[in-house]
Amino acid sequence: MKSRTNETWLSDLRRSGEVREEALNDLRAVIQKGLPYALSRWLPSDAPLFAPLIEEVTQETLLRVLDQLDTFEGRSLFTTWVHKIAIRIALTELRRKRWRDASLDELTENEDAPPPPGLLADPQASPETSAERKDMIARVRRILEDELTPKQREALVLLGLQDMPMEAAAKRMNTNRNALYKLLHDARLRLKKRLALEDLSPQDVLLAFEQK
């Protein structure tokens, strides 16, 4: 692994081609080396969830770091800053997955039991609320069509909604992992700017996908 200063990390990740590819691969190794120890107090390394969680968190951390490079102030080592981002993402994902697993267990144990409230749209929504929701979904779909390329939309669906592993998604799309990182990074930036202009949130995007 190449030794880098804070400035070199930033410079290499902002470049393109082989320099950026090497930096992403090295940063991936840094994240995956530190995560198991950091998560050991919450999740044993032999748990079935452990390896998929490490991969998922690594993927999301790389994307988050690329999104937030300009916010790094240099008060610590760059790799320390990245490690803190990874831990926050890991704990969030762990809480989310445990809630989801518990909800699924509840449903499978008693098929007649009503689903948890968060899994269904509000059946008591007024006609006005339903109309507003449909209008919002239509706006989000239009934004996705206008702002993203077909490849970017496919990447968001495979990785963000279907939880497909990065390697499998890259193979499906006939590309490599680092090119897929770049694809997602660009898509997120374009969506973030457009959603801000439209006064919509990322949750609105997920709702639009779920309603398809």
Image (tube, rainbow, N blue to C red):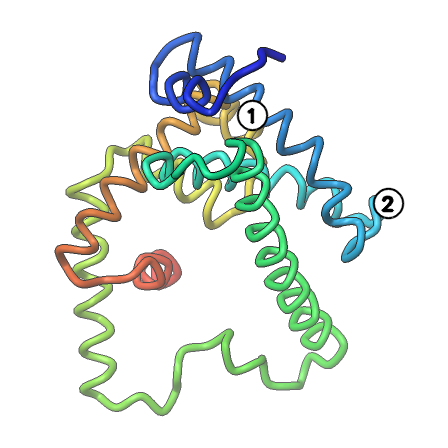
Amino acid type at circle 2 is: Asp
Residue at 83% from the left image edge and 49% from the top image edge: 47
Q: Is residue 15 above or below residue 91?
A: above
Q: Is residue 122 above or below residue 81?
A: below
Q: Determine the image quadrant of residue 166.
A: top right
Q: Residues within 10 Å of mark 1 (few under 14, many from 20)?
A: many
Q: Is residue 100 left or right of residue 129?
A: right
Quarter of the figure with the N terminus: top right
In the foreground, 199 or 170: 199
Q: Determine the image quadrant of residue 64.
A: top left
Q: Is residue 117 left or right of residue 121?
A: right
Q: Is residue 195 left or right of residue 93?
A: left
User: Which residue extends farthest top?
Assistant: 18
Q: Determine the image quadrant of residue 92.
A: bottom right
- The residue to which callout 2 is attached is 46
- The residue to which callout 1 is attached is 27
Quarter of the figure with the C terminus: bottom left
Where residue 5 sits: x, y (%)? 50, 19
Where residue 28 sits: x, y (%)? 58, 27
Q: Residues within 10 Å of mark 2 (few under 14, many from 20)?
A: few
Residue at 17% from the left image edge and 63% from the top image edge: 199
> Secondary structure beneath disc 1?
helix
Q: Is residue 66 above or below residue 178?
A: below
